[in-house]
């Protein structure tokens, strides 16, 4: 094993061993500051100037902006430092300890996406002491797996700026130029509880929710007709009825119930229009049933993302990888970096199919090809 590979494995082991779960569940949610501080130390040693941007009030959640060189333009290599929650009882090995077996690196975040940072730093190390014509920026963000508040903070601050950005989410080193957006919403129905022996004593929230669910399923079919996009494997918006809670006893008319759903929009449409239409449909059902129905966002929505197929970054990535740019169903921070004026793609080592589940791993065979690919990208944009 080369010295370069040993350093990558040592760094990844330290990152995997530093827990940084982000979650909408307060019982799971943690900060990422320890990961950010570790990356800042390593990048400073490589000659990068580092800036830490607090994302919350106590600084336990933060972004890192590390810059090598100066001037306009340049390239951003971006990744998130948080992971999803985990059930260690379902893992064959400790999820917070990097374990190598069968030419795979097992560990929480190994592929999604702590593994990208040691690879990006290995690529950058080849340019130490060289006169970069445009800057190389390594960006590390907070809370991608929950609120995306890290990327939102960058977009609000209006930096970093560069010509191009590569987000190293696991794509098997295939460039991705398009993905769906996501909305997570709650429908709350408030009726009137009463004794089940006489329907006139109450107004069933569950019966109204039955109408709500039927209407959402019908609306889903409309979305499929209006916003289909054959560039996606699942070529239409999806609307998933995820969970429902309500009522407390079979002999009581249900007074309250709540439904959670997610909607993944293609770039053919936009979240705001669709959410407005859903709200109108809910108001109509509320009027029909003479009760209250309200729509609440569970998280801030993420816009669909599309990068022009003919832009410089997409064309370069396709040439270097030999793969045409693809579309994916999962959401990333790409819309926020694109807001900063950068051509943006998603391209990194590993497979998204292995993320968010027990025994997540990164194939060893992906590491050196990714280092070489990123070095070619750096040469193109920074030398």
Image (cartoon, rainbow, N blue to C red):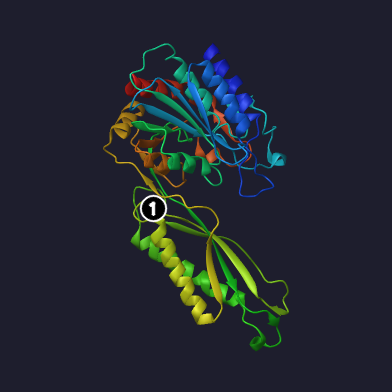
Q: How many marks?
A: 1
Expressed as whole percent of the image width and height from the top left, the position of residue 151 reads: 48, 40
Instruction: Work out whether residue 144 or residue 371 is closer to the camera in this orientation and state it.
Output: 144
User: Which secondary structure, mark 1?
Assistant: loop
For image coordinates 47% across by 16% down, the residue present is 125
Q: Would you place residue 361 above or below residue 9 in this image?
A: below
Q: Quadrant of the C terminus?
A: top left
Work out whether residue 212 can be spotted.
yes
User: Residue 90: which quarter of the image?
Assistant: top right
**Label 1: which residue?**
266
Pointer 1 local density, CA inside 10 Å: few below 14, some 14–19, many at least 20: many
Residue extending farthest to the front is: 57
- Relative placement, left or right, of 263 versus 345 is right
Q: Would you place residue 282 above or below residue 24 in this image?
A: below
Instruction: Work out whether residue 205 or residue 98 is closer to the camera in this orientation and state it.
Output: 205
Expressed as whole percent of the image width and height from the top left, the position of residue 323 reads: 35, 33
Q: Quadrant of the N terminus?
A: top right
- Relative placement, left or right, of 177 versus 332 is left
Residue extending farthest to the left is: 310
Instruction: Work out whether residue 239 or residue 359 is closer to the camera in this orientation and state it.
Output: 239
For image coordinates 49% across by 80% down, the residue present is 287
Work out whether residue 102 can be spotted.
no
């Amino acid at each position: 094993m080369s010295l370069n590979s040993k350093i990558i494995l040592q760094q990844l082991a330290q990152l995997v061993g530093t827990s940084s779960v982000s979650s909408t569940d307060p019982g799971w949610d943690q900060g990422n500051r320890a990961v950010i501080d570790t990356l800042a130390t390593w990048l400073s040693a490589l000659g990068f100037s580092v800036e830490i941007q607090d994302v919350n009030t106590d600084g336990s959640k933060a972004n890192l902006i590390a810059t090598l060189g100066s001037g306009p333009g340049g390239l951003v290599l971006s990744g998130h430092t948080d992971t999803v929650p985990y059930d260690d009882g379902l893992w064959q090995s400790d999820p917070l300890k990097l374990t190598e077996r069968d030419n795979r690196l097992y560990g929480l975040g190994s592929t999604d996406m702590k593994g990208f940072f040691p690879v990006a730093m290995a690529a950058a190390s080849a340019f130490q002491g060289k006169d970069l014509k445009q800057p190389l920026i390594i960006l590390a963000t907070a809370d991608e797996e929950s609120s995306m508040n890290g990327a939102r903070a960058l977009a609000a601050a209006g930096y970093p700026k560069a010509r191009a950005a590569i987000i190293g989410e696991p794509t098997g080193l295939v460039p991705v130029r398009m993905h769906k957006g996501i909305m997570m919403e709650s429908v709350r129905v408030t009726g009137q509880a009463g004794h089940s022996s006489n329907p006139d004593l109450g107004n069933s929230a569950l019966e109204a929710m039955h109408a709500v669910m039927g209407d959402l399923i019908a609306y889903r079919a409309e979305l499929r007709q209006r916003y289909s996009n054959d560039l996606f494997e699942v070529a239409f918006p999806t609307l998933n009825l995820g969970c429902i809670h309500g009522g407390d006893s079979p002999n009581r008319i249900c007074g309250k119930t709540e439904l959670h759903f997610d909607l993944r929009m293609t770039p053919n449409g936009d979240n705001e229009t669709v959410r407005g239409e859903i709200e109108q449909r809910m108001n109509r059902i509320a009027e029909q049933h003479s009760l209250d129905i309200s729509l609440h966002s569970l998280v801030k929505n993420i816009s669909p993302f599309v990068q022009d197929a003919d832009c410089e970054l997409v064309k370069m990535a396709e040439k270097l990888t030999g793969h045409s740019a693809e579309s994916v169903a999962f959401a990333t921070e790409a819309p926020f970096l694109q807001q900063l004026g950068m051509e943006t793609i998603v391209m990194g080592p590993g497979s998204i199919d292995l993320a968010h589940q027990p025994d997540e791993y990164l194939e060893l065979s992906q590491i050196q090809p990714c280092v070489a690919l990123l070095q070619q990208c750096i040469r193109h944009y920074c030398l």
